[in-house]
Amino acid sequence: MKNLARLIGFGLLASTALSAPVRADTTPEAVIEHYADVAEAKYADSLATAQALDAAIEAFLAEPTEDTLAAAKTAWLAARVPYQQSEVYRFGNAIVDDWEGRVNAWPLDEGLIDYVDASYGTESDENSLFTANVIANSQIEINGKTIDASKITPELIADTLQEAGGIEANVASGYHAIEFLLWGQDLNGNGPGAGARPATDYSLENCTNGNCDRRREYLAAASELLVADLEEMAANWKDGGAARTALEEAGVAGGLSTILTGMGSLSYGELAGERMKLGLLLGDPEEEHDCFSDNTHNSHRYDAVGIRSAYTGSYTRPDGTEMTGPSLAELVAQKDPAIAKELAADLDATIAAMDAMVERAETVEAYDQMIATDNAEGNATVQAAIDGLIKQTRSIERVIAALDLGTIELEGSDSLDSPDAVFK
């Protein structure tokens, strides 16, 4: 959706690390507590927007028209904004990592879920469920066992289909399964256009592509499951919740290491490497994060906003409320003002590069076109954002040293560290 960031109007608070006064009384304990408070807010906002998405899907299923489908898509796009800003809590917080695959795993072999175009193929040496098409089949076989899929429920999706057969590409739940069910496949390769699933795929009176009753079941169940999964994580960050308790028990060094592990690992190995550089190296539209909706540029940007938020302690909520508090930026400024200023500038520069990528996506071409192998300008736009992420990671490493936190292992990526290995 054009100008999505400006239309939604949150998550856009500029860095305050340089402009706000540094509180001399900022303590590590206060920084860690505020980090947890912002996590609680981000997951609460992710839950609220997922509930709004669920309501939009319910309205769509009650009256499946192109207008109600468009409204459900808009709700999905809005739901991505706070969730992507929460991804900085991954890597450092084990409870988040253990849970994350249920809501944001990608890429997925969508033939597990529903019909696919002939160009998708019919079989995979790596996935026996490549075209299992649960929506069309009331029974499927997993590892030699016949599974009753006559009723599609949240339990069937979560307990049986998600990563069925131990295969990560069998993504049956979460944002991207719902994205596929709303948009359908993007069959345009590196050309213009996103998925174009018709609303009639969910019509009981004018059904297209068959099995509309079961497709309705799957979409409703997947949406219900997403809400339940986010309820779980939102509760984990409340007072007494498992995530907040684990952070408190980690102590000062452990808590600060948690914050910086999340920032550095998302910045380098996950976002710069696996989500961006890999797709750029391969020129492969299947490697874009929100590949059915062509929303990848926004998801990448909000990941970067989330990284900066963990440093500045600032977060703008959907209602426009700005959260601020004792920040890692202030703590670092007490230790080494030069390094504090350096990281703040790097984080802002990365956001500026992401903004340029978003602007190009809204006015020139989608992200999957930008990463095409013959698109020098598009490639350069994406690479500039990657370069920003890499540079800020080096500054994050200097912050780790300045705070005397010892050795923290950040996530790496073959795409960045051994690019030749990607082609082997």
Image (spheres, rainbow, N blue to C red):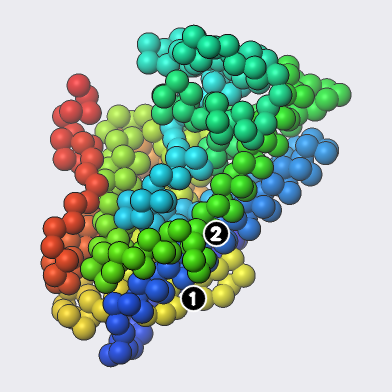
Instruction: Identify the residue at image location x=51%, y=54%.
Output: 233
Q: Indicate left or right for 344 with 399 as reference.
A: right
Q: Position of residue 293 (x, y in %)?
A: 55, 39
Q: Against 175, is 342 above or below?
A: below
Residue 12 visible, this angle? no
Give the residue number, with chain letter if any, for mark 2.
Answer: 235
* SS label for mark 1: strand
Residue 34's label in the rendered image is none
Count of numbered tags: 2
Q: Residues within 10 Å of mark 2 (few under 14, many from 20)?
A: some
Q: Against 79, is 155 above or below?
A: above
Q: Indicate left or right for 30 with 138 as reference.
A: left
Q: Position of residue 99 (x, y in %)?
A: 45, 45
Instruction: Identify the residue at image location x=83%, y=25%.
Output: 204
Among the 4 quarters of the image, the one containing residue 30: bottom left
Q: Position of residue 393 (x, y in %)?
A: 22, 57
Using the image as rendered, state which of residue 162 and residue 418 is in the foreground: 162
Mark 2–mark 1 contact, CB under 8 Å? no
Residue type at mark 2? Ala
The quarter of the picture where the C terminus appears is top left
Q: Nearer the viewer, mark 2 or mark 1?
A: 2
Q: Indicate left or right for 395 with 33 as reference.
A: left
Give the residue number, with chain letter if any, for mark 1.
Answer: 323
* SS label for mark 2: helix
Residue type at mark 1? Met
First in sequence, mark 2 or 1: give its number. 2
Among the 4 quarters of the image, the one containing residue 159: top right
Using the image as rendered, state which of residue 374 and residue 188 is in the foreground: 188
Q: Against 218, is 365 above or below?
A: below
- Furthest-right residue in this view: 205
